[in-house]
């Protein structure tokens, strides 16, 4: 698939991030407009620096970055940031072109990312490069008091660690991006948990799963078979956080009944996103970084 995304601008050089550049990364991270803080420096050093590509301008000024990951046949753009002074100059497009080129070089056939629903400029760029809306997500702030108003937890359930062998079948059952759940299981700050029958055995249908991220009090991905199953997962997350933390950030994906009920109960919406997916465009003319 050939896509015309315009001529390449020239002022920038692309290079891999260094472990000692956490401050640069953390400063640009705030431009994402998220409530959560930047990932800790230890995560940057051990995992993210080697997957982050800085766009460096004249005199070494960093104008933006993209953080990418390869998930088998899929390339995932985890973050893409352009500094305010460098916007409307084609840098976002340039970073995306190079991400696509790297993914193709590593054997990927498709790519995906998440974007704010109200980011019109970014949506225009990504759709121009062949991506389409696949899923929607809503980040809701859930309190302990709100949780108590959900239907009761079904009997006979426990929350247990998610074994690597469960990643692929649960990915298929909940239509998640292939390879993403398994990748989360290898990263710092992530704790994959699932609902299971109390007395062992496997359920014939998926009951629920969550990636519990204590550092940002975030549950993402988060899927549950019913409102009661969702309550079971969130109660377990609150228990792990302890009494000092009264609020959870829960990302509800493609689950209208759960989102509507949480909204009705007063859960605050902090972020609304789309997940975009598409076939990698043919950008053979892009210059290698």
Image: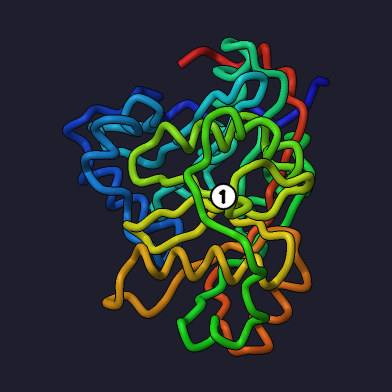
Quadrant into which the C terminus falls: top left
Q: Nearer the viewer, residue 16 or 288?
A: 16
User: Residue at the spot x=67%, y=72% of the render?
Assistant: 228
Q: Residue at x 28, y 52 (%)?
A: 27
Report the residue that reaches farthest toward the front: 199
Q: Residue at image x 25%, y 44%?
A: 24
Question: Which residue is identified by label 1?
Answer: 194
Residue 253 spot, x, y in % from top left: 68, 59
The answer to whether residue 191 is seen in the rendering is yes
Residue at the extreme right of the image, as rendered: 1
Q: In the displayed structure, does residue 141 sit left or right of residue 223?
A: left
Picture coordinates of residue 82, whole percent (x, y):
45, 47
Q: Quadrant of residue 32?
A: bottom left
- Choose between 161 and 33: the one closer to the eye: 161
Please tell me which residue is depicted at 68% across the width and 42% down the height of the picture.
202
Image x and y of residue 79, in percent: 48, 43
The relative height of residue 192 versus residue 247 in the rendered view (above or below) is above
Q: Depth check: 207 or 75 in front?
A: 207
Callout 1: helix, strand or loop? Answer: strand
- Residue 120 visible in the displayed image: no
- x, y percentage for residue 105? 58, 10
Please say if 197 is above or below 62: below
Residue 192 as seen in the image, left or right of residue 279: left
């Amino acid at each position: 698939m050939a896509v015309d995304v315009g001529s390449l601008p020239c002022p920038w050089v692309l290079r891999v991030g260094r472990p000692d550049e956490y401050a640069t990364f953390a400063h640009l991270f705030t431009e994402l407009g998220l409530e959560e803080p930047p990932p800790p420096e230890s995560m940057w050093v051990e995992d993210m620096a080697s997957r982050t590509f800085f766009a460096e301008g004249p005199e070494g000024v960093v104008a933006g970055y993209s953080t990418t990951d390869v998930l088998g046949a899929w390339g995932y753009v985890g973050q893409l940031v352009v500094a305010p002074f460098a916007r409307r100059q084609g840098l976002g497009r340039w970073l995306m072109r190079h991400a696509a080129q790297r993914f193709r070089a590593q054997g990927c056939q498709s790519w995906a990312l998440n974007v704010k629903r109200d980011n019109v400029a970014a949506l225009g760029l990504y759709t121009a490069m062949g991506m389409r809306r696949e899923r929607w997500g809503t980040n809701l702030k859930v309190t302990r008091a709100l949780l108590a108003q959900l239907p009761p937890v079904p009997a006979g359930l426990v929350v247990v660690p998610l074994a690597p062998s469960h990643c692929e079948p649960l990915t298929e059952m909940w239509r998640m991006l292939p390879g993403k759940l398994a990748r989360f299981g290898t990263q710092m700050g992530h704790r994959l948990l699932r609902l299971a029958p109390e007395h062992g055995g496997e359920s014939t249908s998926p009951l629920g799963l969550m990636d519990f991220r204590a550092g940002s009090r975030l549950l993402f991905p988060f899927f549950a078979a019913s409102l009661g199953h969702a309550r079971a997962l969130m109660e377990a997350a609150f228990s792990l956080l302890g009494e000092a933390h009264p609020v959870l950030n829960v990302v509800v994906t493609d689950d209208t009944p759960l989102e509507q009920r949480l909204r009705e109960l007063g859960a605050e919406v902090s972020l609304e996103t789309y997940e975009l997916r598409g076939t990698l465009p043919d950008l053979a003319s892009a210059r290698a970084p």
